Amino acid sequence: MADEFPYETKIEIDKAPRPKPPKQVAVIDQTGCTGCEACIAFCPVDCIEIVPGPKHPDFMKLVEVDLERCIGCQLCARYCPWETIDMWGWEEGVEVAPSLTVRSLLYDYDPEQMHEAAESRS
Ligand code: SF4
Ligand code: SF4
């Protein structure tokens, strides 16, 4: 398992860190996210954050997983009504996250990959 997290953190989250690194992390494919927020209610460690809408901050909001705090419990993936959350091994998850993320509050992902994800959503 990679020790280093490859992305810079954009904001400080004042929540407890996870006790140990998980085998898997949840990555939300934001191109399929409706912003229903159902997943937030299931997350036992409160690591799913609301993200401003890509076109207007107050409308069509999205959510993203704080990959540094996810414990890999799979509950969000199981209960997302739109089946837009997948579980990935830690290394694969952090690698694929930018290409599935339209907008991130948490991390400084690769802008080119995020642009492509945003294009596929529109
Ligand atoms: S439950 Fe699924 S569709 Fe709803 S906000 Fe979470 S990821 Fe998006
Ligand atoms: S896998 Fe579990 S800990 Fe990770 S975001 Fe989903 S509900 Fe939260």
Image (cartoon, rainbow, N blue to C red):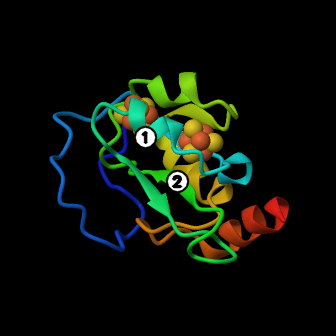
Q: Nearer the viewer, residue 65 or 49?
A: 49
Tell me which image quadrant ligand 2 sits in: top left
1 sits to left or right of 62: left
Q: Position of residue 79 (x, y in %)?
A: 55, 25
Ligand 1 within 8 A of label 2's CB?
yes
Relative vertical location of residue 122 with respect to residue 79 in this rendering, above or below: below
Give the Cα separation between the discs numbered 1 and 2.
9 Å
Residue at screen point 37% across, 70% down:
8
Residue annotated with mark 2: 63
* Above/below status of 108 relative to 80: below
Q: Which residue is mark 1?
A: 40
Q: Earlier in the sequence, mark 1 or mark 2?
A: 1
Q: Please report the residue visible at 59 percent of the width from the left and 62 percent of the height from the top.
A: 61
Residue 59 coordinates in the image, percent (x, y): 63, 68
- Circle 2 Cα neighbour tier, 10 Å, few/some/many (<14 / 14–19 / ≥20): many
Q: Residue at x 48, y 42 (%)?
A: 91
Q: Amino acid at mark 2?
A: Val
Q: Secondary structure at mark 2?
A: strand
Q: Is mark 1 within 8 Å of ligand 1?
A: yes
Tell me, yes or no, whether the two marked residues, 1 and 2, touch with CB atoms within 8 Å. yes
Can you see residue 36? Answer: yes
> Does residue 86 appear to the left or right of 12 in the view shown?
right
Q: Quadrant of the N terminus?
A: top left
Image x and y of residue 114, in percent: 66, 67
Callout 1 environment at 10 Å: few (<14), some (14 to 19), or many (20+)?
many
The amino acid marked with disc number 1 is Ile
What residue appears at the point 58 percent right and 67 percent down from the top-left corner?
Answer: 103
Q: Position of residue 19 (x, y in %)?
A: 16, 34
Judge by depth and name the residue closer to the eye, 18 or 40.
40
Name the quadrant containing residue 87: top right
Report the quarter where the C terminus lies. Answer: bottom right
Reply above or below: 114 against 97: below
